[in-house]
Image (cartoon, rainbow, N blue to C red):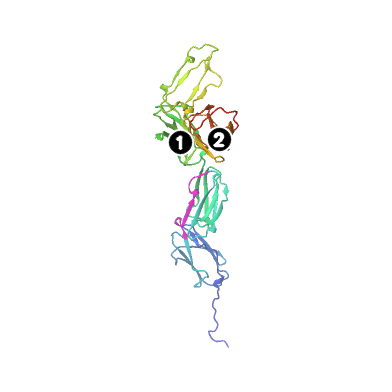
Amino acid sequence: MEIYGSSCSFPVYDTSCVVISDIPRLLIINQPVEFTIDVSKTGKGQLEVAINNGQVPKQVKVLGNSKFHFTFIPILNEPYIISIKFNGHHVSGFPKQCQVITSDNIIIRGLSLKPILVDTETWFTIDILHADLSDLHITIFTPTNEQLDPSTLLTSDGLRVDWIPSEIGTYIIHMILHGYSIPGSPFYVKCYDPKRVIITPPINDSTIGEATKFLLDVSKAGEGNLEISVNYSDRNIPNEINPIGNNRFEVQFIPHKAIVHYCNILFNNEHVSGSPFSVNVMEIQRVVAIGKGLGSVPINIPTSFTILTPDDDIGESECEFYIEIFYDNIPIDNSPFIARSFDVNQIKILNFPSSAVVGSSAYFTINATDAGAGSLEIAVSRDGKNIPNYVKNEDSTCFHIKFIPDQACMHQAQIKFNGIHIQGKKNPTRELPQLSHINQVH
């Protein structure tokens, strides 16, 4: 018997059959968040999606066959709560809270944050608050758009990235999290090489009161800060830099004292090749040439003349002379000749040991800063036999000498500069046989 009203229907559904694509827990501010929901196997019912209780707008696109595509954009630095219901019941795993990543959540440390030297290993670390850094992908593009694969390592300070730039120019570093660039990405890093800076120094000596000029070409060195200083006796004097195009510059200064001036050029706080270089400054009126060789001279008889230079500050040891010789108004072969003066009396021998222990290293120092250009010959001997000595350059004009006495007797040091013996109270010398252990230092 059929009971009146006993026939009825009601929907049957299963929220566990709702399929939702992955929604990242960390969201990039101002970047769209996209996900899909598939309710084709869930049964009949109503799908409800709300973000922060409906306060955040979303876009829905129907894909067909009970599939939907949702998009929203987080624009505030606050948690976003995503609620998904089917027929009024929450789908498993929801509501879900997501955090937003802004530049305030990102900490980057390391050498790669400033201009870096070419062919030098560099690194940086990146840490993102609340983020799983294993999902962070780093790619680096060279100035010629080649992709580099840097080495990465998770550390207590974050993800460490090591790489070596091999080209001069701008490198682009992309940091991708969950398919999107993190705030601030891509990052730009300048690479430079101070060795590519070309200095064209003054050809001749400088004269008091006249502009002295030299050229700098940084067109192939990359981007960076160029610092130029001119000084003498630890006193800086003004200089003027004038661009002449294509990253080339003319630098000029006016000396006011007859003394050697030193020009220092730094590129990104590093000395460029050839820096510092010296410029001799002279009072041209006080340079005098005298002698019989300047007047009428007989043939086949040696003659000579003398050039007198000022003694004030510059010293004769650092002069450079250009001697031009003409015959019948035609320069002879190899003219002009360059004569460089030097002064062995300016060689300073420091800390020469008054005694030493057999088998132990003994040291002394030679300072040739004020002696002019030339080469040193150093020999250490005892009983007429030379023993090895070792020279370490502290800089281009100061040398550290080491030798090891092998017998308990008087040891002697013989030092020559440009072939001339140097006499000193603490380095007795005498005539020696042919030397077998001589260090020549230029």
| Residue at numbered disc 2 | 409
- Whether residue 198 is visible, yes or no, is no
N-term mark: 1 or 2: 1
Q: As displayed, is residue 156 above or below residue 266?
A: below
Q: Is residue 235 left or right of residue 292?
A: left
Queried whether the magenta region covers residue 114, the answer comes back as yes
Q: As displayed, is residue 19 above or below residue 335?
A: below
Queried whether the magenta region covers residue 174, the answer comes back as no
As drawn, the residue found furthest toward the front would be 408
Tag 1: residue type?
Answer: Asn
Which secondary structure lies at badge 2?
loop
Q: Quadrant of the N terminus?
A: bottom right
Q: Where does residue 250 sit, x and y in percent of width and height?
A: 45, 33
Q: Quadrant of the C terminus?
A: top right
Q: Where does residue 363 sit, x and y in percent of width and height?
A: 52, 38
Q: Nearer the viewer, residue 80 or 326?
A: 326
From the viewer's perspective, is the residue at label 1 or at label 2 nearer? 2
Give the alpha-carbon distance from disc 1 to disc 2, as whole Å: 47 Å
Which residues fall within the magenta stretch? 100-117
Number of numbered discs visible in the structure rendering: 2
Q: Which mark is residue 425?
A: none
| Residue at numbered disc 1 | 264
Q: As displayed, is residue 19 above or below residue 377?
A: below
Residue at position x 52%, y 18% from top?
325
Residue at position x 51%, y 57% from top?
156
